[in-house]
Image (cartoon, rainbow, N blue to C red):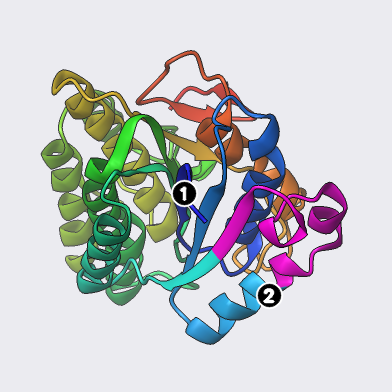
Amino acid sequence: MAFKRVAAITGANKGIGLAIVRNLALQYPSSAFNNGPLLIYLTARDQRRGEAAVKAIQNDTQLKKAKALASDGGLASIKYHSLDISQPKSITDFATFLRQEHPEGIDIVVNNAGIAMDGFNNDVVQQTLQCNYHGTLTATRSFLPLVRPGGRLVNVASIVGNLNSKYSSSIRSAFASSKTVDDVTNLMENFTAAVKEGEEKEQGWPSAAYAVSKTGAIGMTRAIALEHGQEGGQVLVNSCCPGYVITDMTKGRGSLTPNQGAQTPVFLALGDIRGKSGEFWEDQEVSQW
């Protein structure tokens, strides 16, 4: 089958990521993006879980009823591909694969993969930032050049990344005034160094690895969107909060289903967002960072 549109979703074997794949398949036919068959790469670290997720999608009652999948006469095809965003080589390998398989380019990237670890110490901070910030940054840098003009790149962040009172006024100001990826990365490195010295609170940081990683992801996405636009790029690059979703990451304590949590990322991937780029979104609206 000749695919007219290609999407890649990271961290997609369960939870919000899997729901994003489902909802892309469901909503694509009625979207302005629809110009023919859609291929969605469902990526995950674990091959067994990733392939099981593809099988679950193929047997999904709602998708069958909607005839969303190619196997039922619809437009969407789902394929598994290995990807671990905490490993730079894994990102590079997937980007190379996409470039070889789709030399004409792809259309949609949703970077959903991330981790939330219990506790707070130097190791937790390093692992969390390596995946949620540095991994997402590397994925964004690697996949954005593959996206065709008019395409979308979405980084799933969190409302806990807001610039609120958990930060000192000077750190809030540094984030708010950041213009480049280096500006944001330097702040991430400052946080890591402060934690290593046991002085993060004294220096105005919260003792919260996940929250800081998501603040960095929002700032980095904004900086890349700015850079991309200044270079004449025509891909809309945004970050979003999916809401407080019932997933393994929230230990089932959320208030939204994964399908509800998928709505804003899918809206940013397929919807009419009025040409906005570099924004942080919540509930399908631009939200204050």
Q: Position of residue 242 (x, y in %)?
A: 60, 43
Residue 259, visible in the rendered structure: yes
Dot 2, how many residues are within 10 Å of its Cα: few (below 14), some (14-19), or many (20+)?
some
Q: Position of residue 117 (x, y in %)?
A: 47, 71
State the residue in front, 184 or 105.
105
Q: Is residue 60 left or right of residue 104?
A: right
Image quadrant holding the C terminus, namely top left
What numbered label is drawn on residue 208? none
What numbered label is drawn on residue 7? 1
Q: What is the magenta range?
A: 56-78
State the residue in front, 250 or 32.
32
In the picture as drawn, the residue positioned furthest to the bottom comes out as 48
Amino acid type of disc 1? Ala
Amino acid type of disc 2? Lys
Mark 2 sits on what residue?
Answer: 55
Mark 2 residue element: helix
In the picture as drawn, the residue positioned furthest to the top comes out as 274
Residue 156, visible in the rendered structure: no
The residue positioned 63% from the left and 29% from the top of the image is 31
Residue 16's place in the image compared with 237, above or below, is below
Sequence-wise first label, 2 or 1: 1
Mark 1 residue element: strand
CA–CA distance between discs 2 and 1? 18 Å
Q: Are marks 2 and 1 in contact (CB under 8 Å)?
A: no
Q: Is residue 150 left or right of residue 200?
A: right
State the residue in front, 278 or 23.
23
